[in-house]
Amino acid sequence: MTTESTSVPPSPGPWPSAVQGPVPGLASLAPQRGAPDRLALPPRRRARPRLAAVPLIAADALAVLLAAALLPEPQHEIRLLLMVAACVLVLNGYAGLHRSGALTSVLDELPALAARAGVAWCVAAAVVAAYTPGLAIGPVALCSAYGVHVAAVCLGRGAVQARRRRTARAHPRSALVVGGLAAARRFAAAAAQHPEYGIRPVGIVGARPDGGTPQPAGEPGLPVLTTTEEIHRAVIQNTVRDAVFLTDDSGLLTLFQHYGCTTWRVGGRSRDGAMGDHLWGYACRRVVPLGERRGLTAKRALDVVLAGPALALALPVLLLCALAVRLADGPGVLFRQERVGQNGRLFTLLKFRTLRPADETESATRWSVANDRRMSAVGGFLRRSSLDELPQLWNVLRGDMSLVGPRPERPYFVAQFSRIHAGYADRHRMPVGLTGLAQVHGLRGDTSIEDRCRFDNHYIDHWSLWQDVRILLRTAAGLVRPAGS
């Protein structure tokens, strides 16, 4: 944060919800907490059982059965079938190939399907040859089974997807379009003219062209919704199941996901998207809610696996730091401070004390800046080397924090920054972290809050376990040339 770029009001306000950030071009979407016309969110819709995946799973399993039928006796025994089927289903499921919808073409999925089928058959053949040499599958038989498998899975999945397209055309799902009025109307017109994509726009979420005057009765075009009350009413009355975003807005995205709507991002470029991932030429991809993303359990496992040994290995360093603080600055080695974690939950963050605040009010409301005259030489060294952050490994083990995530802040500043910077409250959709994408880009200490907010939300929106590993490696490399915080 820079003091020139951010002015902090004199007193903290209430905790802001994730949908209170201002929306570009959108008027009064979410009234402030405590306002008399504030709309309480309805109960979150429970996800329906994913029965839509059953036909695709059946097509994959049937392809394995047909391919194995070509193998001579006794090579197509039940153990081989189960082994290949299990590999195929696990690999396809992990790759998201059982989520295909009306927009998907089997030709788009063919490379992924063929690659995973090849891995499954090669693994099964290798296991059979290793443990039952008499039943080893020859190269000709293996290639024939693989070819039949790929052909059968294309035919089966093609039939499933064709049926879904027919169903989508006959029974399109109601959708709201979020974005600028002109662009939203063009997209809605294209979707209405091509019902094969299964989306029927029933309203637009955006600013009215005249600044707020309701659309006159009888005026052609879709209604324009600008308040949470109108969105709430439209979702219920029209049984809205999809929200199509032509612009980035994490607050509205969270709101529609809370309603249980499938959220889509239209426009922009996708480096890894398939050619078929479009809606009449509009690039289209599903935005998966954070709670549904694969790997979040692995993220917590990574925290425990790394933080536990790190805390044990760092014990001598922790003892030396504690001794240095005690000798230089007196009693009170650890500094405890209330911070805001995931979903606004408060927790007590641990650090080595680098200076002694005048009182609790200063500790909670004063922005720490570099070169404070009260900071001793030991405190300055701990900050520059980031050794003062080491006790937070205990916060990671407790589950208060993660190794990687947005840096936690005090409630006072969270309330202020949430009102000043659009999207700041959205940083709390994910566990806060010891380091993060903003920090490895040099945004530490007295740097721009707006820049940090942008980096943190980008990290959350594009999270993957590999990104966490990359950030940890960059953080470790940065310790060689510390810049402090």
Image (cartoon, grey):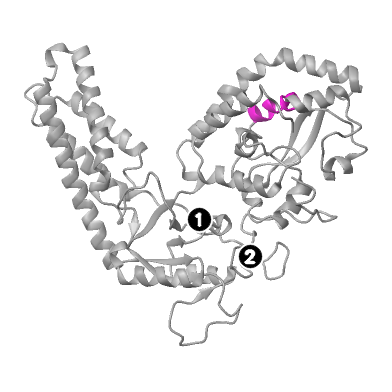
Q: Position of residue 84 (x, y in %)?
A: 23, 29
Q: Is residue 51 left or right of residue 47?
A: left
Residue 68, can we see it?
Answer: no
Q: Position of residue 479 (x, y in %)?
A: 66, 24
Q: Which quarter of the rendering shows the N terminus? A: top right
Residue at (58, 80) in percent of width and height: 210
The picture quadrant where one finds residue 332 is top right
Residue with the mark numbered 2:
30
Q: CA distance from mark 1 to mark 2?
A: 15 Å
Looking at the picture, tell me which residue is in the foreground, 475 or 424.
Answer: 475
Q: Is residue 121 left or right of residue 183?
A: left
Residue projecting furthest to the left: 72
Q: Is residue 68 above or below residue 174?
A: above
Q: Position of residue 262 (x, y in %)?
A: 43, 56
Residue 56 falls within the magenta-colored stretch: no
Our reading of the magenta stretch's main secondary structure is helix
Residue 393 falls within the magenta-colored stretch: yes
Q: Which residues are magenta?
A: 386-398
Q: Which mark is residue 257?
A: 1
Q: Which quarter of the rendering shows the C terminus? A: top right
Identify which amino acid the numbered label 1 is placed on.
Gln
Identify which amino acid the numbered label 2 is placed on.
Ala
